[in-house]
Image (cartoon, grey):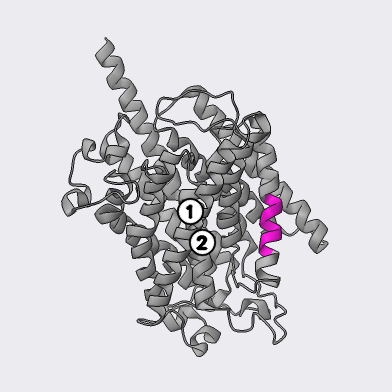
Amino acid sequence: MEHNLHELKLSLDTAWILIMGLLVFFMNSGFAMLETGFCRVKNAVNMLSKNVSVFFISSLAFWSVGFTIMFSQVSSYIGIKSPVGLFLTRSHDFYSALRGIELPLESIFFFQMVFAGTAATIVSGAIAERTKFVSFLLFTLIMSAFIYPVSGHWILGKGILYQMGVRDFAGSLMVHTTGGMAALAGAIVVGQRVGKYNKDLSPNAILGHSMPMITLGGFIMWLGWFGFNLGCAFGFSPKLCAHIALCTNASGIMGGLGAMFTSWYLLRKPDLSMTINGLLGGLVASTGTCAFVSLQSAHVIGLIAGLLVVISILLFERVFHVDDPVGAISVHGIGGIWGALALGLFASPVQIICKHISYPKTGLFFGGGTEQLVKQLLGISSIVWWAFTASFILWILLKHTVGIRVSQKAEVDGLDVAEHGMEAYPGFTGSSEGLL
C-alpha cells in the first residue's frame, strides 16, 4: 500500500510539473502577441518570426549544453568539466543539484527548458525593429547555452550564490534579471531606431500597431505565470500551491493598478500599455517572492513593481536615451531586481514547509534584520554584472563579425519585406504615420 501511494504521488507530481511547463510554453504566444503589438505593421512578421524561432534555438542549446551547465554541480561557478553530461545523456544522479527531487529527469528538463526559452525571448522586444534576424538567433544560441545557465547554476543549481544564502524561488534573478540585462546590453550596442530621437535627444513617440494584441499578450502571459511559479514547487503541495497562486495574482493585479495610476499622474492619462507592462512587472516581482511572503506583502510588492516599471520606462527613454520599444528592460530587468530585493525586505517567518524548497532568512520588515537583504543585494549585483557583461561582449562580437543592425533603408522600409520577403497584413495599408 505504501509503495502504491508513493507511485501515485510521483505520477501526480510529474503530471503537475509537465502541465505547469506547458503553461510556461504557452507564454511564448503571449510574448509574440505583446511584442508584435508594440511594433509597427512593417515589422510584425519579423517579431513573430523571432518569437517562434527563439524557442527552436533555445530548446536545442539548453538540451545540448545549458542543462548540464546549470545543474551538474562540478564547482560553485559552472556545472561542467567534460562532455559526459551533455545532451541529457546521464542519469538523474549525475545532475547533483537535482538530488532529492523525486521526479523523472525528463520532466525536470522539460520544465527548465521552457524557462530557458523565456529568458531568451525577453531580449527580442528590446532590440526590435532594427536588428538582423540572424544576429538575434546567434545571440539566442549563446544566451541559452551559456549565459542563462550560468546564472541559473549560481542559484537554482546550488552554486556560489545559493551557498551564500541568496534565494530566488522562480526566477526574478535567474530568468528575468538575466534576460533584462541581456536586453539592456543589446539595446545599447544596436543603438536607437531611426527617427526615435531628435537632434536635442528629445524622444519621439513611435506607436505600436495593435493595442488588442498587446492586451491579449498580457492576458496570455498572466495565465502562463501561474505555471511559471506553481511549477517551481516541483510537485503538488495543496497549501503551498494555493498560497503561490494567490500571491502571484496579487502581485500582478497590484502591479497593473500601480502602473495605471502612476501613468495617470505622470502622463495625465491612464496609459493601457503602461498598465499591461505594470501587470507584467508585478508578476516578475512575484517570481522571486511568491512562496516566501504573506499575501498582504505580495500586494505591496506588486504595487511598488508597477510604479517602478512606469518610472523606469520613462527614465530609459527620456534620460538614458535607451530605445526599448516594448519596455522589456524595465519589466524584466527592473522588475526582477525589485523582486529579488523585496525578498530581503518581506520574507515572512511563517512558511508553508516543502522539502524541495530552501527558505530564506526572515526579511527586514518582519524582524529578521538585514542579513537576507544583504545576501539579496549580493545576488543582484552578481547577476547584473554577469548577465550585462557577458551579453555586452557577445553583442560587440556579433556587431564586428556578422553585424547586428539592418541597413537604414531596410529599417525604414520595414524588416518584414527586407528580412522575410512578406507582409503581416497583405492588401492593407496603415492609415497613420505611427503604423508605417
Residue drawn at point x = 58 percent, y = 74 percent: 40
Mark 2 and mark 1: Cα distance apart in space:
12 Å
Residue 129 in percent (x, y) is at 53, 75
Q: Quadrant of residue 108?
A: top left
Q: Would you name the residue on which mark 1 appears?
A: 382
Q: Residue furthest top?
A: 1
Residue 159 horizontal side relative to residue 213, left or right: left
| Highlighted range, magenta | 306-313
Q: On screen, 249 above or below 191?
A: above
Q: On screen, 5 above or below 98?
A: above
Q: Quadrant of residue 399?
A: bottom left
For the residue labelled by badge 1, is the local secondary structure a helix, a strand or a loop?
A: helix
Residue 36 in percent (x, y) is at 54, 66
| Image quadrant where one finds the C terminus | bottom right
Residue drawn at point x = 30 percent, y = 29 percent: 102
Q: Amino acid at mark 2?
A: Met
Nearer to us in this view, 283 or 146: 146
Nearer the camera: disc 2 or disc 1: 1
Q: On screen, 256 above or below 396?
A: above
Residue 143 in percent (x, y) is at 38, 61
**Residue 222 belongs to magenta span:** no
Residue 251 horizontal side relative to residue 94, left or right: right
| Image quadrant where one finds the N terminus | top left
Residue 260 in sight? yes
Residue 283 in sight? no
Residue drawn at point x = 49 percent, y = 86 percent: 410
Q: Would you name the residue on which mark 2 appears?
A: 181
